[in-house]
Image (cartoon, helix red, strand yellow):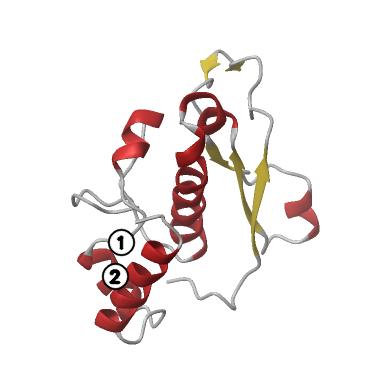
Amino acid sequence: ERKLEDEPYIVFVVAPHLYPAGRVEGKDLAWVYSTDVGEDDDWEEEDPRIDAWVVSTHQVERFVPPRMQIKEVCKVLLYCVLLEALGLHICENLDCVMNNNDSVGEMEKVPLRLCPTCMRKLHLMGVVEDVPATHRRVASFLAEKGLA
């Protein structure tokens, strides 16, 4: 179990594509819109406590209508933070931001909220104190910002 105060966590948001050539070591990575920086990076030799994720806006900018782009980038950022910083896992429940996305089309179907199971996990981790109140605040915030 990981606690927020235990280790620094960084998310880099970049506008250019992560893999502009589309191929790295024989793998087709042209679809990638987020990736873990990995343990082989130089800065982890300086401070192994640092964990980082890179999010590229390239696929969203290329395939998502402009009015929906902020919402889709928010989903990717939330997914990265919950997955890596808090230790939630990929969720198979319907209607959860922690659903795995293998394409921009799949990403568009995922909501910008957690399912009850993942919210309960955060409660058990001590991140969320009052689950119903948190659901109400999240729903209100998303509606207010036009992201619901």
- At x 19%, y 52%, the residue is 93
- Closer-to-camera residue (89/109): 109
- At x 31%, y 45%, the residue is 110
- At x 54%, y 24%, the residue is 62
Residue 32 in picture, x, y percent from top left: 51, 29
- The 10 Å Cα crowd at callout 2, few under 14, some 14 to 19, many 20 or more, is many
- The 10 Å Cα crowd at callout 1, few under 14, some 14 to 19, many 20 or more, is many
Instruction: Work out whether mark 1 precedes mark 2 in sequence or the reverse, and give the earlier one.
Output: 1
Q: Secondary structure at mark 2?
A: helix
Which of the 4 quarters of the picture holds residue 123?
A: bottom left
Q: Taking 18 as reference, is 144 above or below it?
A: below
Q: Amino acid at mark 1?
A: Leu
The mark found on residue 119 in the picture is: 2
- At x 48%, y 71%, the residue is 2
Q: Amino acid at mark 2?
A: Met
Q: CA distance from mark 1 to mark 2?
A: 6 Å
The mark found on residue 114 in the picture is: 1
Residue 45 in picture, x, y percent from top left: 77, 53
Asked if one can make out residue 103 in the rendered structure from this viewpoint, the answer is no
Q: Secondary structure at mark 1?
A: loop
